[in-house]
Amino acid sequence: MSFVDDDKEYYYRRAESELEMAQRTENPEAVKAHYTLAGYYLDKVYNDDAAAIMALNDAMMNAAPPGASLS
């Protein structure tokens, strides 16, 4: 398995994890954040281009710290 395949497998598992968390949480802002992150991870799996990388980095850089209000 190549590094690219390993990366895609990692991002796919992360997307699945984010989707599961979105389905378990009751907070609408958290649901939105989990679905957004899942989308970015799936972009990394299926559209390995600069835009997907930048979007994922932006999401991670702008993520609220634990316990912070998203409003």
Image (cartoon, rainbow, N blue to C red):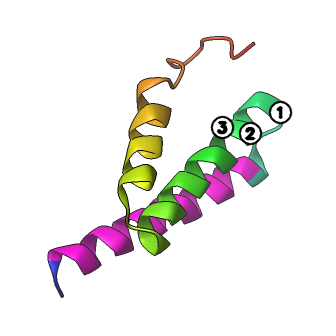
Name the residue carrying label 2: 32
- For the C terminus, the image quarter is top right
Q: Are marks 2 and 1 in contact (CB under 8 Å)?
A: yes
How packed mark 2 is, by other alpha carbons closer than 10 Å (few <14, some 14-19, many 20 or more), is few
* Three-letter code, disc 2: Lys
The answer to whether residue 67 of the structure is visible from this angle is: yes
**Which stretch did the figure color magenta?**
3-22
Q: Residue at x 46, y 67 (%)?
A: 13
**Element at label 2:** helix
**Element at label 1:** helix
Q: Is tag 3's residue or tag 1's residue first in the polypeptide sequence?
A: 1
Look at the picture and state if 64 lies above or below 20. above
* Three-letter code, disc 1: Pro
Name the residue carrying label 3: 33
Q: Residue at x 83, y 33 (%)?
A: 28
Determine if the magenta segment contains residue 49: no
Look at the picture and state if 34 lies above or below 30. below
> From mark 3 to mark 2, how far is it between C-alphas?
4 Å
Provide residue 41's location: percent of width, then percent of height.
49, 58
Q: Residue at x 66, y 58 (%)?
A: 20
Q: Which numbered marker is on residue 28?
A: 1
Give the farthest residue toward the bottom.
1
- Left or right: 39, with 7 as reference point: right
Q: Residue at x 53, y 65 (%)?
A: 42
The answer to whether residue 27 of the structure is visible from this angle is: no
Determine if the magenta segment contains residue 5: yes
Picture quadrant where residue 38 is located: bottom right
